Image (tube, grey):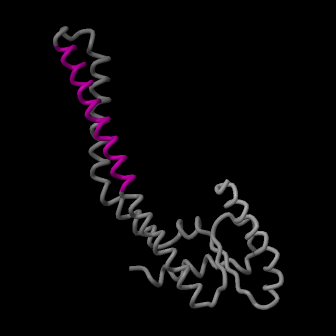
């Protein structure tokens, strides 16, 4: 029962807010909207994080690519020369390919996991900076309400996305 009451209470609060906004708008309520997707894409911190991740992971990615290419070459050799090889050489080559594929798959999985962990760490840092910038801008420019998500419509008049990006550029560390 308690779980079904909470969404109903949230809905009632939103309806009350929606009904009150036109009255409050006449008294000078200042509302802003921020397109978070645009901010996360264009923030200088995001570009810095992308470059840092690229630098951090590029050598591992290059090693994986080189290993994948080497395995492909071994498979080509097996396909073209396999019928003329001795049974022992053919078997040894097949085992070598299988061993290297397993090792490659493990290394590739570790790479993806490590990259995702680091990407999530950087994303959390950026999200924190974006939140702080929005709050700073809200206080500095005397906004009463700034919304970010699940907005069906926001006029350009209240869109402060560019201001948030400027604040992020200013506060870039």
* Residue 24 image point, x, y percent: 79, 85
- Rendering quarter of residue 124: bottom left
* Residue 132 image point, x, y percent: 49, 79
Up the image or down, 51 lies above or below 17; here it is above
Up the image or down, 60 lies above or below 99; here it is below
Up the image or down, 163 lies above or below 77; here it is below
On screen, residue 126 versus residue 74, left or right, reads right
| Residue depicted at x 53% and y 67% | 40
Identify which residue, 14 or 111, lies in the foreground.
Answer: 14
* Residue 27 image point, x, y percent: 79, 91
| Residue depicted at x 63% and y 73% | 34
| Residue depicted at x 34% and y 41% | 109
* Residue interval drawn in magenta: 89-117
Identify which residue, 154 or 105, lies in the foreground.
Answer: 154
Q: Is residue 61 magenta?
A: no
On screen, residue 57 versus residue 93, left or right, reads right
On screen, residue 78 versus residue 88, left or right, reads right
Q: Quadrant of the C terminus?
A: bottom left
* Residue 153 image point, x, y percent: 75, 68
């Amino acid at each position: 029962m308690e779980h079904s009451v909470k969404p109903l209470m949230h809905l009632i609060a939103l309806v009350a807010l929606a009904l009150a906004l036109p009255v409050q708008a006449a008294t000078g309520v200042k509302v802003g909207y921020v397109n978070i997707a645009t901010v996360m894409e264009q923030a200088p911190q995001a570009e810095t994080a992308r470059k840092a991740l690229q630098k951090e992971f590029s050598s591992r990615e290059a090693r994986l690519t080189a290993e994948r290419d080497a395995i492909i070459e071994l498979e080509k050799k097996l396909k073209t020369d396999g019928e003329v090889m001795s049974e022992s050489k053919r078997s040894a080559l097949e085992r070598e390919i299988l061993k290297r594929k397993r090792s490659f798959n493990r290394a590739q999985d570790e790479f993806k996991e490590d990259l995702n962990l680091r990407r999530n760490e950087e994303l959390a840092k950026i999200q924190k900076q974006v939140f702080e910038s929005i709050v700073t801008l809200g206080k500095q420019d005397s906004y009463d309400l700034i919304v970010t998500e699940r907005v069906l419509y926001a006029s350009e008049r209240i869109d402060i996305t560019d201001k948030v990006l400027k604040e992020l550029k200013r506060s870039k560390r």
